[in-house]
Structures are given as C-alpha cells and as structure tokens.
C-alpha cells in the first residue's frame, strides 16, 4: 500500500487538483458576494463577471446602510425570535415523541408510530394546511411561523434511533429506585443524549433560519416579516420600498447592488460562522437519518 | 429502552377480558408516557391530519364562506378539469424531466466525490475539502436563487461563459432552454457535500482486511476500487437510488417559484408550483387541492412500489 505505481501518482495529482477546483466552485459564489459587499457601489454596476477582490476602496458603507434599514433590522429580530421559539418548541415535542416511541412494550406504540411516520409520506397539501392556519386565527401572527411545521417526523425518527440505543440497564436501575417516566426522561435519557439533542436543535435552527415560504403566504404585515422574506424583496423583487431611508430613485439604483450583497452577507454570516464548529453533530445526524430515513 | 414490562403477548388469549387487563396494566405502568404523547398527538392531528381531511375540498366547488361542509359537492370535476387543461401535460412533463435530470446528474456525483475523497491521503486536506463541501447546504434557497440571478443576468458570469461558447441568447435566467440546467446544476452545487456524507461513512465502514488481502494478491488501487469498494457500496447505492426513484413526481415549489418567471414557465412550471399559483395566487382552492391530492397519491404509489422493490432486492426499506 505504501508504494504508489506511476498510474496512482498521476491519479493523485489529478485528484488533488480536482478537489481544489471543486472547493473553489463551492466557495466562489459566496466569495463573490462577500467581495461585492465591500466594493464601491459605482464600480459594481460597471463590473461584469465574478468579483474576486473589493472593487475600488474597501468600504463598509453598504453594511452601514443595511444596519440603518429598519425593515432589515426588524426582520432580523423577528427571525431570531422565530428561530429560538420554534426550535425550542420543536425540540421539546421531538424529545417527547422519541421517548414515547422508545418505551418498551407500550400497548399503543404502533398506532403512535404510525401517526407520526405517516406524516412523512402523505400530507394534506398547501391549501388545506393554509385553511387550518387560517381557522386557528394564526394568519398574520408570529404563531403561524412558530407552530406549524415546528416538529418534523424525520427528526423524531433520528432521535428515537438514538434513544433506543441507550442500555436498558440504566432505566431499569432507576425504576427499581422508584423513578417514574418523567424522572427517567429528564435525569437519565436526556443527560446521556446531549449529542443527539444538539443535532436536532441544529436541524431545526437551520430549517427555521432559512425558511421563507410559510411567511410569504401567512404574513401580510411587513412588521412581522422574517429575514428571508425581506431579503427576497430586496434581492429578488428589487423592491422600490425605500431600501435607503430618504433617498431619491437615482441613489437607490446606484446602491441597489451593494445593498443586495450586504443583506445577503448579513443573512448568511451567522450560518457561515457556526457551521464549521457544529459540522460534527451535523454529520452524525445526517448519517442516522440516511440509515433510518 | 425503558423499563415497563412487556405487556403479555397477545395471540393465544385474545379474548376481551385479557385484552382489557392488558390495557389496564399498560395504563397503570405508562400513564406518564401517554401524558407525554398528548402534545405530540395534538400537534400532528391539528397540523397534519386535519389538513388531510381538508382534501375533501378537492371534490367541492369550495368557497371560504360556505366552508368545507357547506360548499357544493362536484365529485371529480376538479380532477377532470385538470386533466383537460392545457397545463396538465406541461406541468407533469416538467416535473418528471426535472426529477429525471436531477437523478441522472445529481445522484452519481456524491458517489464519485466520496470515492475520490477516499483516495486523498492527506487527512487535513480531506477534512478541509469535506467541510467546504457542506457549506452550500447551510445557505438559504432565497440566497442561492439570488446568486443564480446574479450569475445568470445579462452580464453575469455564467451568461458570459455561455457566450464564450457561442451562445448569443442573452441572460440565461430568462430563457426556458436553460431553466432545467440551472435548477439541477444549482441543486448539485448545494447538496453534493450533504449527499456524499452517507457514502463517505459507508466507505469508512468497509473492512480494511479486504484491501490488505487484495494488496497481497497484487491488486492496485484501481482494481481495489472496482472489486472491493464498489461492491461494498452497492447496497447503499441501490437503496438510496430506489428511494430517490420514489420521489420522482416530487419537485418542490420553494425553489421553483423563486427562480421561474412567466418567460420560463414552459420548462419551469412543475405540479407543485402550479398548485401554488392556482391556490394562493388565484384562490381557486378546490382545484388547487385536487391537483395537489392527485400528485400526493401518485407520490405515495411510486413510493410504495419503490419501497417494495427495495425490500426485495435488499433488506433495507422505509418500513
């Protein structure tokens, strides 16, 4: 194994080169946006193709404008509120469901399993779900972004798989000591399941941070917009809606590309900073999910 | 994993009294568990099962005022209307084509990527490449589509590259003939790293003794890959492939409705995006629900077939 043949050496060269190129392909779009966000707005419109370095003098002016933009700041706060509450609620329900599914010999376990897993393969669809949210008077409230979709069957399956690998001896010993199910869950199961809880929190938080669709159909009130929806307005719909306070049309047009790049950056920076540190959990979750899913 | 003694095996004594006894005992032991199940059951009933009941709208000329029980019953009219509509074939064709191209191109890449990465000996380089490959997965669809627009506008980099190869049609994003390529291509970009995780872990699980034996027999890396790695991976590949086939009629609307425009509907409009347009934009609720229901039924059917094939060919299946 130690000695490489000539063919293997040539392959290795190609392989390393290919991997470097591939990594560049993954990175370049984000790099382009980052460099664009630091560029001189006048030069961005004159430039075509990928921005590899800041055009003109490096400036944080775009970020300043974004920070002064009320709709972005407000939607950022909304997103944080939604991510935290929806992730907390979703994780709570997921833990409960997973515990129920992992209790041995539970009489009603099969129907419960079915109730949960059937939602993975069939659903009522867009309009009937919309009607339910409507009838619950949740339209145009934070609740419509926090509760529907906060708990995902797929994540329950992942967590249940992990729960059922905990040795029975642990809970048996606790039962002999007189512990009930709640104590077993909180004092035995949860403390040894920190890793899987981190995985599930991560999955929910990513899902909620990046979500935009539900808000686009449930929310009319612009004060409740989450970040992705405001981002869509600014970047994809080129909204005329005062991306810069008190500016005339011409100024807005000049600054539009810069603001685009800067608002994209503010929306992805948290993910970009966090993900390298949590990828271990992420990989674990994906692996359990793809084996069981 | 928990302690409750298994309820006495049913089967031999299935008379009523013993079952009553069983449930009673189960209730005594597991009252707390059932209490925990309540919020979960309530959640799924409200947000998943009541909407399933709402599918009744598909058979009605639904009006919000009259509600689901007051609206006029029209039987299969909404379905007939869809099958007779000029869009029916277009959205089904687009859905199948995008799925098919997705399968054709985005399925093999993660496997090849995993195989190549497996040959990298420098551990740090390998880790770094892998970390970079996950990065696009964490980016939202809104941002991905924004970048696609940026790159495919009339002076975007991809449009320029296409122009270098003699393409003179202008901005790629507004041209129907480019939509599928952009859709599938950006999906590969976003999910390659994520989809390779399972293969990378399957590769790591291969028994190293197999390779050692092969080396003794004089097999090089290439032969080892052909005769050991691929056969060892094949069951994972088959299962994932079949499960992907089960999703063939399932192209989501989230990315489509951000990416398409009336100019590209011809190739871009899929069943889900049509359901969205008819339902949310035109408020034609019954009709939209009918198309959605038809799509879900086909999905379910395909999934069942795929799953039973998977179970026959290998031991793995969804249920």
Image (cartoon, rainbow, N blue to C red):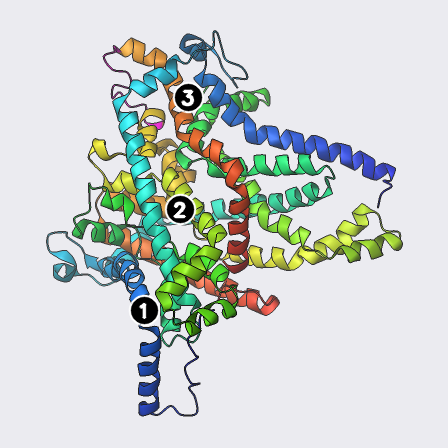
Query: Could you classify mark 2 by the number of other residues whose Cα lies within 10 Å: few (under 14), some (14-19), or many (20 or more)?
Result: many
Q: Nearer the viewer, mark 3 or mark 2?
A: 2
Q: Are dots 1 and 3 in contact, CB under 8 Å?
A: no
Give the residue at mark 3. Answer: A261
Task: Identify the chain of the residue marked 3, using the numbered disc in the image.
Answer: A
Real-space Cα distance between discs 3 and 2? 26 Å
Res B177 visible? no
Q: Position of residue B48 (x, y in %)?
A: 30, 58
Between B172 and A33, the one lying in front of the other is: A33
Write the residue at 27% across / 54% down. Answer: B289
Q: Is residue B265 above or below residue A63?
A: below
Q: Is residue A239 above or below residue A283?
A: above
Write the residue at 67% across / 51% down. Answer: B203
Q: Secondary structure at mark 1?
A: helix
Q: Read off the magenta span.
A: A236-248
Q: Nearer the viewer, mark 1 or mark 3?
A: 1
Between A71 and A128, the one lying in front of the other is: A71
Q: Is residue B207 above or below residue A33?
A: below
Give the residue at mark 2. Answer: A204
Q: Position of residue A210 (x, y in %)?
A: 39, 38
Which sits earlier in the primary sequence, circle 3 or circle 2?
2
Task: Name the side, left or right, on which A280 lies relative to B255.
Answer: right
Q: Secondary structure at mark 3?
A: helix
Q: Secondary structure at mark 2?
A: helix
Res B143 visible? yes
């Amino acid at each position: 194994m130690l000695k490489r043949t000539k063919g293997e050496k040539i392959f290795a060269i190609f392989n390393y080169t290919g991997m470097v190129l591939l990594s560049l392909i993954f990175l370049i779009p984000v790099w382009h946006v980052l460099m664009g966000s630091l560029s001189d707005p006048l030069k961005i419109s004159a430039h075509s193709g990928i921005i590899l370095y800041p055009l003109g003098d490096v400036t944080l002016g775009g970020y300043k404008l974004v920070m002064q933009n009320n709709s972005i700041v407000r939607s950022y706060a909304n997103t944080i509120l939604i991510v935290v509450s929806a992730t907390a609620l979703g994780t709570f329900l997921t833990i409960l469901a997973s515990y129920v599914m992992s209790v041995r010999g539970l009489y009603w376990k099969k129907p419960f399993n079915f109730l949960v897993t059937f939602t993975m393969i069939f659903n009522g669809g867009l309009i009937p779900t919309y009607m339910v949210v409507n009838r619950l008077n949740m339209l145009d409230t934070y609740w419509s972004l926090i509760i529907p979709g906060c708990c995902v069957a797929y994540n329950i399956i992942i967590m249940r798989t992990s729960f059922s690998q905990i040795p029975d001896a642990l809970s048996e010993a606790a039962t002999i000591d007189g512990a009930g199910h709640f104590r077993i869950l909180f004092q035995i199961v949860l403390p040894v399941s920190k890793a899987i809880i981190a995985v599930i929190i991560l999955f929910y938080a990513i899902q909620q941070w990046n979500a935009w669709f539900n808000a686009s159909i449930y929310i009319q009130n612009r004060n409740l917009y989450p970040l992705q929806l405001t981002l869509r307005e600014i970047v994809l719909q080129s909204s005329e809606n005062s991306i810069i306070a008190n500016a005339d049309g011409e100024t807005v047009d000049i600054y539009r590309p810069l603001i685009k790049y800067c608002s994209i950056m503010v929306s992805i920076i948290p993910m970009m900073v966090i993900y390298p540190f949590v990828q271990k959990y992420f990989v674990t979750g994906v692996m359990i999910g793809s084996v069981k899913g | 994993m928990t302690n409750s003694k298994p309820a006495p095996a049913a089967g031999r004594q299935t008379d009523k009294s013993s079952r009553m006894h069983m449930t009673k005992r189960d209730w005594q032991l597991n009252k707390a568990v059932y209490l925990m199940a309540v919020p979960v059951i309530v959640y799924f009933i409200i947000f998943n099962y009541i909407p399933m009941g709402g599918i009744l709208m598909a058979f009605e000329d639904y009006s919000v005022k009259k509600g689901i029980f007051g609206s006029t019953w029209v039987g299969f009219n909404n379905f007939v209307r869809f099958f007779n509509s000029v869009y029916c074939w277009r959205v089904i064709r687009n859905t199948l084509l995008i799925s098919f191209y997705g399968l054709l191109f985005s399925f093999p890449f993660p496997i090849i990527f995993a195989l190549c990465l497996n040959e990298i000996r420098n551990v740090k380089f390998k880790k770094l490449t892998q970390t970079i490959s996950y990065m696009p997965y964490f980016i939202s669809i809104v941002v991905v589509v924004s970048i696609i627009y940026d790159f495919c506008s009339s002076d975007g980099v991809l449009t320029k590259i296409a122009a270098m190869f003699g393409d003179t049609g202008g901005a790629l994003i507004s041209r129907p003939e480019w939509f599928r390529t952009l859709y599938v291509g950006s999906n590969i970009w976003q999910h390659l790293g994520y989809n390779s995780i399972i293969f990378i872990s399957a590769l790591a699980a291969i028994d190293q003794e197999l390779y050692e034996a092969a080396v003794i027999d004089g097999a090089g890396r290439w032969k080892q890959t052909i005769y050991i790695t691929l056969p060892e991976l094949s069951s994972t590949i088959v299962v994932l492939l079949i499960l992907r086939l089960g999703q063939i009629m399932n192209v989501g609307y989230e990315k489509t409705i951000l990416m398409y425009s009336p100019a590209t509907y011809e190739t871009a409009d899929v069943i889900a995006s049509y359901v969205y347009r008819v339902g949310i934009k035109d408020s034609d609720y019954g009709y939209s629900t009918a198309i959605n229901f038809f799509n879900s039924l086909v999905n379910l059917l395909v999934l069942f077939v795929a799953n039973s094939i998977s179970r026959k060919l290998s031991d793995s299946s969804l249920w």
